[in-house]
Each structure stands twice: as C-alpha cells, then as structure tokens.
Amino acid sequence: MGWRTYLVMYFGTNGVKTSEIAKKLSKLGFVTKLGGVDFIYEWNDKQPTKEDALGLGDRVADVLAGSGAVFNLDTHD
C-alpha cells in the first residue's frame, strides 16, 4: 500500500467554502475521502522523511491561511 498522509479537517466559518479548500488541497496531491479521514496524500514508492511530512504540513497550512480551518496530519505506511 505504501506511505500515506491522512488529513482530517476542521473547517472554520471565515467565509471560505469547504469546496474551495478541497480544490486547493487536490492541487497539492490530496484525494478526497469519506469516513474517518477527509483527504489522503499518497507518497507512492517514496518513504517520506520527517522534513517531507513537515513540508507537506506547511503547504496545507498555506492553503488554509485565513480560512479559520484547522487540521491534523498522520503519516504512516
């Protein structure tokens, strides 16, 4: 199955639509899911380093800036 980063979102009410956030996250490589997690990022054949995972978190934070949303990332194989 490979390494994945699971993203759980808690959306804010600052006027940014959840669909807009989802579109931006898909441009980062996240796929929308239903169930216990909201999005999954596949690392393909790469085992991410701590810096890779933190960098992905930084990019998610950039996407969410000003939206009022908060998130949780969980990266494992």
Image (cartoon, helix red, strand yellow):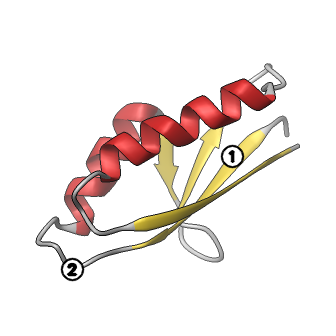
Q: Residue at x 74, y 42 (%)?
A: 4
Q: Is residue 6 above or below residue 28?
A: below
Could you tell whether 12 is left or right of 52 in the image? left
Mark 2 residue type: Thr
Callouts 1 and 2 close, C-beta under 8 Å: no
Q: Where is residue 59 in the image (x, y as percent from the top left)?
A: 44, 35
Residue matched to label 2 = 13
- Viewer-closest of 7 and 42: 7
Q: Which one is in front in this view, the residue at disc 1 or the one at disc 2? A: 2
Mark 1 residue type: Thr
Q: In this view, does 34 lie above or below 31?
A: below
Q: In the figure, residue 77 lies in which quadrant?
A: top right
Q: Which residue is drawn at 68% across and 35% down?
A: 53
Residue matched to label 1 = 5
Residue 21 in view: yes
Q: Residue at x 35, y 33 (%)?
A: 27
Does dot 1 land on a helix, a strand or a loop? Answer: strand
Q: Where is residue 10 in the image (x, y as percent from the top left)?
A: 44, 75
Does dot 2 land on a helix, a strand or a loop? Answer: loop
Q: Position of residue 44 (x, y in %)?
A: 72, 25
Alpha carbon distance from label 1 to label 2: 25 Å
Q: Position of residue 18 (x, y in %)?
A: 26, 67
